[in-house]
């Protein structure tokens, strides 16, 4: 499925975009929603992923907002593999109780580690409760792309993508390698380096499928 990732966006815009696309990722870390806002957003659509990346806000707020989104009806929750273990386990347990699928994600904004390390990340993601393992790494060479794509050899639902201009090919090929979600952006509003906008992505994939 194509997943539109949203950064700074109003509640009404989110509702509209969710109604026009397969699935939509809402980045809470890039917004300043209240608990009431979160309830409105995630109670309005059944195709939303809630994501709250670390760094900008306190962990307790992250935990509260992720939990509120799950309880309100989020279809997926994205949890970083290096999140505090107790916090992560509580969020995963809440997701299980509410029928919300769990994406365990790993991000490396500097480089693409070796295959053995990345394979271990995927294995760990499933062992700690992930329905989907997501690996996103900065691509600095062609070999990095091959390392990322090699993760599709793992059993289970794996999303493997490269960040940066040189990693765009992995985002397209993931659609053909079995990735359950292909992350795209709205025009001019990427939420990750190298993210392709939805119109271009759809056109490229359609062209490949049609030969």
Image (cartoon, grey):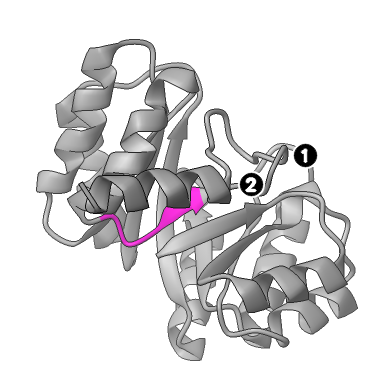
Name the residue at the front extreme. 211
- 181 magenta-colored: yes
For disc 1, the marked residue is: 56
- 20 magenta-colored: no
Name the residue at the top extreme. 141
How crowded pointer 2 is (Cα within 10 Å; few <14, some 14-19, many 20+) is rated as some
Kindly identify which numbered label has been placed on residue 53: 2
Quadrant that contains the N terminus = bottom left
Magenta-highlighted residues: 179-183
Q: Main secondary structure of the magenta part?
A: loop
How crowded pointer 1 is (Cα within 10 Å; few <14, some 14-19, many 20+) is rated as few
Q: Picture coordinates of residue 153 (x, y %)?
A: 10, 46
Is residue 165 shown left or right of residue 142?
right
For the image shown, how many numbered marks are present on the structure?
2
Q: Secondary structure at mark 1?
A: loop
Task: Classify 157 as above or below 191.
Answer: below
Question: Residue at (46%, 71%) from the top-left corner?
Answer: 92
- Residue 134 appears in the picture as rendered: no
Is residue 68 shown left or right of residue 109?
right
Q: Picture coordinates of residue 24 (x, y %)?
A: 59, 65
């Amino acid at each position: 499925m194509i997943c539109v990732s949203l950064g700074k966006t109003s509640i009404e815009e989110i509702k509209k975009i969710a109604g026009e696309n397969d699935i939509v990722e809402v980045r809470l870390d890039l917004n300043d929603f209240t608990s009431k806002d979160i309830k409105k957003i995630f109670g309005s659509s059944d195709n939303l992923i809630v994501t709250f990346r670390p760094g900008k806000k306190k962990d307790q707020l992250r935990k509260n907002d992720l939990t509120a989104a799950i309880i309100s009806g989020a279809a997926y929750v994205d949890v970083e593999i290096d999140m505090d273990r107790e916090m992560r386990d509580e969020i995963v347990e809440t997701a299980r109780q509410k029928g919300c699928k769990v994406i365990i994600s790993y991000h490396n904004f500097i480089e693409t580690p070796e295959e053995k390390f990345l394979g271990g990340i995927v294995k760990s993601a499933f062992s700690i409760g992930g329905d989907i393992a997501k690996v996103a790494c900065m691509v600095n060479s062609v070999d990095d792309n091959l390392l990322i794509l090699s993760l599709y050899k793992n059993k289970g639902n794996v999303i493997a993508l490269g960040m940066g201009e040189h990693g765009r090919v992995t985002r397209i090929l993931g659609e053909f390698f079995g990735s359950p979600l292909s992350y795209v952006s709205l025009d001019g509003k990427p939420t990750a380096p190298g993210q392709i906008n939805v119109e271009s992505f759809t056109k490229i994939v359609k062209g490949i499928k049609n030969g």
